[in-house]
Amino acid sequence: MIEFRGVWAGYGRTTVLTDVSFAVKEGEFTVFIGPNGSGKSTLLKTVLGLVPVLKGEVRVMGYTGHQVVKARELIGYLPQNSSMDLKYPATAFDVVLMGSYSRLGLLARPGRTEKAEALRRLEEVGLAQFASMPFGILSGGQRQRVLLARALMGDPKLLLLDEPTTALDVSAQSELIELITALNRDKGLTVVMVTHDVNLVVGRADKIGYLKKSLQAYGPPEKVLDSQLLSKVYETQVLVFEHDGEKRVVVGDHHA
């Protein structure tokens, strides 16, 4: 689905990703973690063709070079910060329906097919009963699920998630991760997610990558969850321990 070969990418004269190489297979749940400014969001935008590749090769679902942008129709993307104005009088249904606009073009309007899909996507994320509810008055967790439903419009083959649990309470984080896991395991949707908190995805991710401009490590969780390696990535003391049969990570004074 995705392959980076010795990729250097960035904005103008600023290089953000340095010599990054990895591959994501169809159906995998892949997670990238790292400190602020490590290039996680840039990595996702490079997959989308929004950040220029300065050196190396990016291949997304068979497309490479300038053709990578053609893969966007097969990708659902949930950015870190939503541009939705919470005061704008849009319902949850309206927001999900926006996910069809890029496929329809500027002059076309959503029809019965798109409206039926929007309702189906809301049902898929467990919010069908909130379809007519103003988006701005929903809880943070509900808004994220609405935005996830919008990203699922058009039946994407690849889902890119940029810090989807940021600013959510513990319960909402858990619900959202369970939903994403179900999309991956039950529907076979390939998922690539970036996050600060690896504890949210331990036991769910097939691969974990440690990003700090370059890729420090990449592989199955049981092989890359290492205290010494993580301490190097975060430049602070990191503890990895077992709890209820799964590994857990404590970074500095932050823990899950």
Image: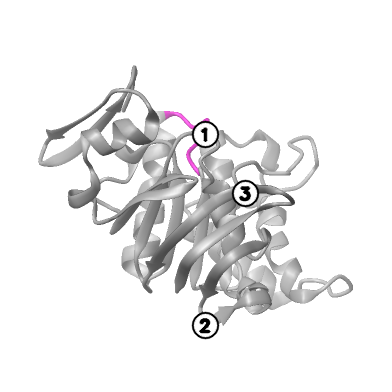
Q: Which residue is mark 2?
A: 62
Q: Earlier in the sequence, mark 3 or mark 2?
A: 3
Q: In the drawing, what numbered circle is on residue 36?
A: 1
Q: Is residue 67 visible?
A: yes
Point out the image quarter for the N terminus: bottom left
- For the residue pair 87 and 229, the one nearer the viewer reads as 229
Q: Is residue 151 visible?
A: no
Q: Residue furthest right?
A: 107
Q: Position of residue 42 (x, y in %)?
A: 59, 51
Residue 168 lies in the magenta-colored region:
yes
Q: Earlier in the sequence, mark 2 or mark 1?
A: 1
Q: Secondary structure at mark 2?
A: loop
Looking at the image, is mark 1 or mark 3 nearer the viewer? Answer: 3
2 and 1 marks in contact (CB < 8 Å): no
Q: Quadrant of residue 197?
A: top left
Magenta residues (range): 164-169
Q: Position of residue 53 (x, y in %)?
A: 63, 63
Q: In the drawing, what numbered circle is on residue 133?
A: none
Q: Hey, what amino acid is under mark 1?
A: Asn
Residue pictured at 22% horizontal, 33% vertical: 227
Gap between marks 2 and 1 measured at Cα? 31 Å
Residue 210 lies in the magenta-colored region:
no
Q: Which residue is mark 3?
A: 15
